[in-house]
Amino acid sequence: MPSISLIIPLYNAEKYLRPCLDSVKNQTFDDMEIICVNDGSTDATADIVNEYVAADARFRLIEQENAGCSMARNHGLKSAVSPYVALLDQDDVLHPQAMEALYYLITKYNADIAEFTNETVPDDFVMVNPPHYDVEKIPAEFSHDAFHFWFRNPRGGSVLVWNRLYKKDAIDGIEFPKDIQPAEDTIFTLKAMFHVLNIVHTDTRLLYYRDSSTSVMNQGKTDKYVRVHAAAGQELYDYFLKSKRVQNKDDYKLLERYISRFIFKSVISQPLRRMKDKATRRQSLEKARELVLPLYEQGALKPELLGWRKSMACRLFFNGHFTLARLFV
């Protein structure tokens, strides 16, 4: 049985797929399986993966009908046989020692999660002469309390899921939400940090994140973006607060403020500031208002937790005064 299962969801990935898979193939840590989940691609994605499958027994391809990144990741997690699992996106590139460093840290500290940082690179990035690390000397910080370590900044830590190695048993039962993308990473990360016990962190940059112009996060704040984030806010509220899963009063307040800030930023502030289509902006903001009002009425969004400016922005937004509301975000 391999030590690590690395899961890569794929959809029409041919443009960047070879650099991604080469960075995996060339890892200094080779005791792993590489699970490529093809989410109904219509380009040459499957053909490219099959080349790697034929040449390297660690690679395997899983085919599924198009169901979205979350379902592809869940499919990969269910198929993984290793005690540790990691995730990678199709257009990103791993440092050659990424898995070696993570495996060293997670086993040395007997942690549930080991995490690193990443470097943002341009769309045309090619990895050349990456730095070499003595993994036993990589600076790291260990915490017995992953949840509060993640919340060492009250605004929360990174919600990225591909800069971590997870002990599979520790995240058993945690899945990516169906039909929520983007924001699926936020939900998965918050649930994981709430349920696991400990974490080890290094500031070492072990992944190159491609800032692609075609990425979901660079497509503007569309109606879909707003709708999905409203659904994500509802999911977070239902899971942590409405369910009364969180018993500690201080933790409840921490999550209450985090969820309110998440909803405000993604469903009110971002649309006001960054909705790209001017011709339909008013209509789009009205839709956002329809989505956020139920969240406010049930207590998922509590403007009073966000300070007077954001509270005023909410009040104006709720009443359809979008131009004035924008002055306070």
Image (spheres, rainbow, N blue to C red):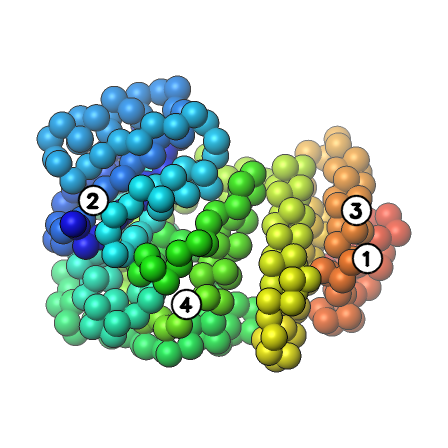
In the picture of the structure, the residue carrying the numbered disc 3 is: 289
Q: Residues within 10 Å of mark 1 (few under 14, many from 20)?
A: few
Q: If you read the primary sequence from the N terminus, does the residue marked by circle 4 or circle 2 appear first?
A: 2
Q: Residues within 10 Å of mark 4 (few under 14, many from 20)?
A: many
Instruction: Residue at 13%, 36% (x, y): give it.
Output: 57
Instruction: Residue at 32%, 77% (x, y): give it.
Output: 142
Residue 130 lies left or right of residue 148; in this view the side is left
Q: CA distance from mark 3 to mark 1?
A: 12 Å
Q: CA distance from mark 4 to mark 3?
A: 36 Å
Q: Residues within 10 Å of mark 2 (few under 14, many from 20)?
A: many
Q: Is residue 252 above or below residue 214?
A: below
Residue 48 lies left or right of residue 226; in this view the side is left
Q: Secondary structure at mark 4?
A: loop
In the picture of the structure, the residue carrying the numbered disc 1 is: 297
Q: Is residue 263 above or below residue 33?
A: below
Q: If you read the primary sequence from the N terminus, does the residue marked by circle 4 or circle 3 appear first?
A: 4
